[in-house]
Amino acid sequence: MKMIKRFVSYYKPHKLIFGMDMGAALLVALIAILYPIMTRLMLNDLIPNRNYQMIVFCGVGLLLLYLLRMLLNYFIQYQGHMMGVRMQAQMRSDLFQHLERLPYGFYDKNETGKIMSRMTTDLFDVSELAHHGPEQVLISAISVVISFFYLGSIDWALTGIIFVCVPFLVLIAVVMRNKMRSAFRRSKAAVAQINGSLQSSIAGIRVTKAFTNAQKETEKFELGNEEFKEASRDSYKAMGQFHSFTTFLTDVFNVIVLIAGGLFMYHGRIDFGDYSAFIVSVNLFLNPINTMIRFAEQFQNGFAGFERFVNLMEEEPEQDSVGATPIENVNGHIQFKDVSYGYAGDKHVLHRVNLTIEQGKKFALVGPSGGGKTTICHLIPHFYDVKEGEILIDGRELHTITMDSLRKHIGIVQQDIYLFNASIRENILYGKPDATEEEVIAAAKRANIHDAIMEMEDGYDTVIGERGVRLSGGQKQRISIARVFLKNPAILILDEATSALDNTTEILIQQALDELCKGRTTLIVAHRLSTIKNADEIAVVDEGRIIEKGTHQELLEQGGMYEELYRLQFKDFY
């Protein structure tokens, strides 16, 4: 019932169109009964009494009503579908906004392709249900009621015999419904699996080609494809059983009418006109039954999609702690106090980490991969929620600060740069959407990318392709740096920002980064120790613990892990 209420809530902004659609559907149902009424009237009265004028008058009147029904059907098909599309668009908008509010952890566990499947395939089925569902239920319900009373007006006994079959039809519908529902759920999940595999394979096509692993990707895709075939087989099997049984019952109705009506006519209970009218009119009952059969399939398909939509909408979004307030004029003093953290379902990645980064200082994290350096970087902008220990910014504990206000003061440059399939200007403007053209150019110049941009055919209007595929690694990195220059944050996080670059490009980008670091509190994660030798303080992180701390020279003199890492990197100079 809760799910139904949630579904119905999406009709509220479209009450007028919905009412008109239902009104049109009602008129279509009422017009449908006129043909058998006219048939009975002509067979029993107008034709035997040779009332040709009324025959022509009724025929013309019926034709005009059919013209009206054509216009009503056009309205139902066009405006009704548009109502469904608008509801689908609203659901998609709600889902997208919800996805934007979900935490980092959600995207650690869910594939992009599967999420996209819920945004597209599932919501299309929901839109079809939103339009056709109420309309078909209304028309079918009205038609069944009208057919009952009209057929009863011809002969109650014959009508009663037909309606005795209704409980059997209801019983079959109830038994088959749950089976169809389960099958359609599995089919939806299989489609999402295919979309996830497809998105992953296309995004990694260059890696696939480089390692000549097309066969491997095909095998992975075919696993999902086979699952889809199996799920579809189950759903269509359930659907086939439902259709075959219900179609058999409707055929039984016709046989009953034929035999019982013939016997009634033989014994003089009804005349030929009523018998003929009853045979024609019984379709008033059979047609809505067939409509409900089709609707049962559509309902299961659409509602399975809506359930998946709701499940995603019920994922817990990021929320500021109660009483959290914005932070203004950030200085950039950062402090970790006994911070321990583990990702969902995993053991702790950090163990009682204590560190202090003074305002405006350059602080570096080094150590083996997987030691927890990136996790520390992700905790500062509150991408993950710390339950053990405290993180303070300018003396304020992270939970007392609203996330948006905190992140506005933090700039991040990572090794894995994400650029949008848009122009260079739009990508730089991501740092400050309302920036002027002069500010964009100034940021690009400070990032040492302006000259390279101007050499491109379209300059700042150059579209860079998905993930910046038309740019070199160094160009992508410098555009990301320009984006941070434009943002002008008080705190800067550089997470392996130059590790994937050649030495020449690294020197060029390092100059831009040095410029970017001026006047900001900077946290640097680096494997190349040459890039952090001048840091104000360096911490060595291993297995989630800070095991050494000091300046470059102090750490070398300690003769611990830092000295060992440094000696390994520069062994040719020893």
Image (spheres, grey):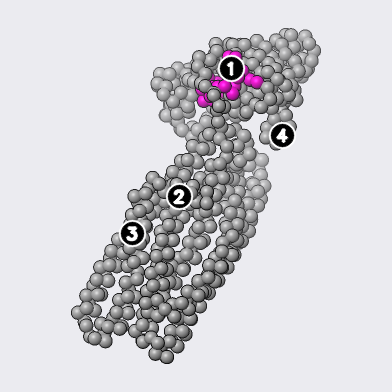
Amino acid beneath label 2: Val
Amino acid beneath label 3: Ala
Q: Residue at x 68, y 32 (%)?
A: 343
Q: Mark 2 or 1 closer to N-term?
A: 2
Nearest the viewer among 398 and 494 is 398
Q: Residue under label 2, please give it.
A: 8
Query: Badge 1: how crowded within 10 Å, few (<14), some, or many (20+)?
Result: some
Secondary structure beneath dot 2 equals helix
Residue 276: give x, y in percent of width and height.
Answer: 37, 82
Q: Residue under label 4, please give it.
A: 346
Examine the rendered structure and indicate whether residue 29 appears above or below residue 222. below
Q: Mark 2 or 4 closer to N-term?
A: 2
The answer to whether any part of residue 124 appears in the image is no
Quarter placement of the C terminus: top right
Report the magenta residues as a range.
390-415
Horizontal relation, residue 574 to residue 253: left or right = right
Q: Which mark is residue 24?
A: 3
Q: Residue under label 1, please give it.
A: 396
Secondary structure beneath dot 1 equals strand
Q: Residue at x 24, y 71 (%)?
A: 61
Q: CA distance from mark 2 to mark 3?
A: 20 Å
Amino acid beneath label 1: Arg
Residue 336: give x, y in percent of width and height.
Answer: 66, 18
Q: CA distance from mark 2 to mark 1?
A: 44 Å
